[in-house]
Amino acid sequence: DAKTTQPPSMDCAEGRAANLPCNHSTISGNEYVYWYRQIHSQGPQYIIHGLKNNETNEMASLIITEDRKSSTLILPHATLRDTAVYYCIVRVGADQTGANNLFFGTGTRLTVIP
Amino acid sequence: GAVVSQHPSWVICKSGTSVKIECRSLDFQATTMFWYRQFPKQSLMLMATSNEGSKATYEQGVEKDKFLINHASLTLSTLTVTSAHPEDSSFYICSARQGAWETQYFGPGTRLLVL
């Protein structure tokens, strides 16, 4: 799987948009970008994923650059409950050999400030 | 989204005993389940991958005789930590997915403390 690079930490004011960047310059054509978050002492929570088009769901939006070498997760109106470590992971769509397992990097620790 | 549960949520045991952790997919059938371990202030480390009815595939450096994984049904996987030692104290998290194309969902984790 391609390696991702994320800033170790970010702050965001409550009510403002949180924009979390991720670099994945070695991503392959069949690799998806996944975002998970982990709130303290809990298991990771799935947020969103995409291949090349921008995606939006009830939690967040995912913006993927045209060359697919980077992406941004956007939380439109951050709340205190969004304080967590956010992980950007790339993985192939389907592979019976296990190459599409999820391997976690160090993520970005987002702190939402009142 | 899909729900994955774990039991127990936390366990304390004496050194040398064995501990079993259960992972269940509650509203979907999981052809593949995963076990991760997370030490304080570190990221999740994949320990093993198991497909229903097959032997688990362990990541490099994970002792398969110490961490026994059973995936006997499409909704249940168990991780048994045999002869636990204090260095096995960690946060163990399972995850599951329905098929190779599907999203992987995580359980809430089990905190193990070995005294």
Image (cartoon, rainbow, N blue to C red):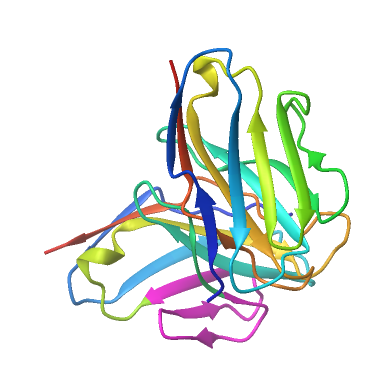
What percent of the width, then of the height, locates residue A61? 45, 81
A82 lies above or below B40: below
Q: From which residue to which does the magenta span run?
A: A49-74
What percent of the width, then of the height, locates residue B31? 78, 63
Q: Is residue A2 visible?
A: no
What percent of the width, then of the height, locates residue A41? 37, 46
Q: Is residue A96 visible?
A: yes
Q: Nearer the viewer, residue B59 or B23?
A: B23
A66 lies above or below B35: below
What percent of the width, then of the height, locates residue A79? 22, 71
Task: Find residue A69 and report its image quarter.
Answer: bottom right
Q: Residue at x 40, y 48 (%)?
A: A8
User: Is residue A33 in the magenta section?
Assistant: no
Q: Residue at x 54, y 53 (%)?
A: A5
Q: Nearer the viewer, residue B89 or B26?
A: B26
Judge left or right: residue A54 versus residue A11: right
| Circle count | 0
Q: Residue at x 71, y 59 (%)?
A: A26
Q: Nearer the viewer, residue B27 or A90?
A: B27
Judge left or right: residue A60 versus residue B82: left
Q: Is the N terminus of chain A in the top left, top right, bottom left or bottom right quadrant?
A: bottom right
Task: Find residue B55 and report its image quarter.
Answer: top right
Residue at the outermost left position: A114
B6 lies above or below A69: above
Q: Is the C terminus of chain A in the top left, top right, bottom left or bottom right quadrant?
A: bottom left
Q: Residue at x 76, y 50 (%)?
A: B71
B76 lies above or below B19: below
User: Is residue A52 in the magenta section?
Assistant: yes
